[in-house]
Image (cartoon, rainbow, N blue to C red):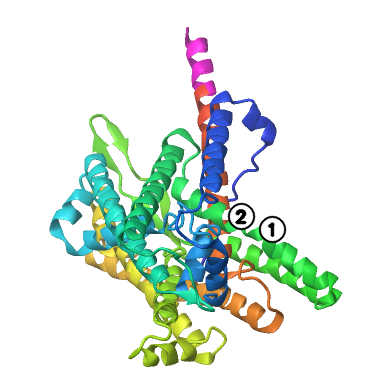
Amino acid sequence: MAARAPDIPAVSFGDITRIPELKQRILFTLGMLVVYRIGAHIPVPGVDAQVLAEFFRQAQGSLLGMFDMFSGGALRRLTIFALGIMPYISAAIIIQLLTVVHPKLEQLKKEGELGRKKLTEYTRYGTVLLAAFQALGVAVGLETFSVNGMPVVPNPGLGFKLMTVITLVAGTVFLMWIGEQINERGIGNGISLIIFAGIVAGLPSAIGGTLELARTGEYDPFTVLFLLVLVIAVTYAVVWFERAQRRIPVQYAKRQVGGRIVGGRGTFLPLKLNTSGVIPPIFASSLILLPATFAQFAKGAPGFGWLEDLAAALNPNGWLYLTLFAVLIVFFAFFYTAIVFDPKDTADMLKKHGGFIPGIRPGQRTAEYLDRVLTRITVLGAIYLVIVCLIPQFLIAKFQVPFYFGGTSLLIVVVVTMDTLAQIQAHLLSHQYEGLMKQARLKTR
């Protein structure tokens, strides 16, 4: 049975202002996010902004639309941060997947801090390669696209491609550096905060658009009230499920170390209900929207009519899209959970440290038990993800509501907010602990 994680103590603004180091970290983080938002409005030269805006209006519901949401509108304006931080996330996931199948990378993963630094280095190289590939695809695609006879790129050619690739790759690398600086000198969680800032940047316009529809009479007051209640309820459900966990009791055997008896204490092994986080809906959306994106670039080209037919069949409001979306979310929920949590490694670690689950034999039986429990709670986690991610489709189909009111964006916003509050609380507790240690040292003197 799933249980909620312990409540995060309330973070008081007064406590933050009394700790200079924490205040500096928060201000540094906010400063880096301001730099990110400024860069999200600096356009890449060589593009007709009006034609590009019309292009993205027609590309709503494609993979480009989803990436534009994660970049806070930077892709729609084709700014220096148009690719956002998604190449880094993709590279990190690929490296994480390779650690399961590649022996050398798997060994690096087990080598502690040195191995982690090497994997981070590989992730950076992968980020540059993926960003260069995506930037070249964007440049080539924009050169071939026009709206009402007006080209998106007035002067196409090698110069535009080279300038676009260099600019977009440099922007992604700079965002990666900002994320690392927030981790080291800020409050942490840098990459997630960049995505969070991009999504939240579009939230005011989404809310404003909804209120404008209510003002013009397209929404009646009961519809607006229903949407407000639904948003609050879904947000509460996301918070509850993201903190829900199955606690497996673990007992440690008593043993003698020198002249002391250690062990004999009981604890628990927490298994999150949603171990895979927001990865399943992101991967599912990317795969299912690929045909629509390719069809948008290949529109009118001979021999690609079947691609347009496939994109039309995968209409976001159609039953085929919704069914495939749900199936892919469930698949990636199990797939990614199997990657990030290995029951056999956990069972071996418990056995090595003298721990065991009451009533379960250590070793292989413990691994089988953990795998069985993890499978059951992953079923619940996958169902929860499917319901939350299908809510936006219902809202769009019935009320023409912006995508920000649910789905992947809501998951990211809620999870990042919870993680950031936990980081701030950890700094507060660390400061209190240091203060208690200083008082203890003074008393002993």
Q: Estimate how packed mark 2 is, as few (under 14), some (14 to 19) or many (20 or more) residues with alpha carbons within 10 Å.
A: some
SS of the residue at dot 2?
A: helix
Q: Is residue 436 magenta?
A: yes
Residue 295, relative to residue 257: is it above or below?
Answer: below
Foreground pick, 330 / 412: 412
The tag on residue 33 is: none
SS of the residue at dot 1?
A: helix
Residue drawn where x is 26% and y is 60% of the image = 362
**Residue 376 in view here:** no
Q: Estimate how packed mark 1 is, as few (under 14), some (14 to 19) or many (20 or more) residues with alpha carbons within 10 Å.
A: few
In this figure, which residue is indicated by the disc labeled 2?
Answer: 201
In this figure, which residue is indicated by the disc labeled 1?
Answer: 204
Foreground pick, 162 / 399: 162
Q: Is residue 129 magenta?
A: no
Left or right: where 297 falls relative to 4: left
Q: Tell me whether the residue at label 2 lies in contact with that at label 1, contact meaning CB atoms closer than 8 angstroms.
A: yes
x, y percent for residue 12: 67, 37
Q: What amino acid type should be assigned to the residue bearing mark 1?
A: Pro
The residue most toward the left is: 104
Residue 34, relative to residue 50: is it above or below?
Answer: above
- Separation of residues labelled 2 and 1 (CA atoms): 7 Å
Foreground pick, 74 / 46: 46
Residue drawn where x is 52% and y is 51% of the image = 40
Q: What amino acid type should be assigned to the residue bearing mark 2?
A: Ala
* Count of numbered circles on the image: 2
Residues in magenta?
435-445
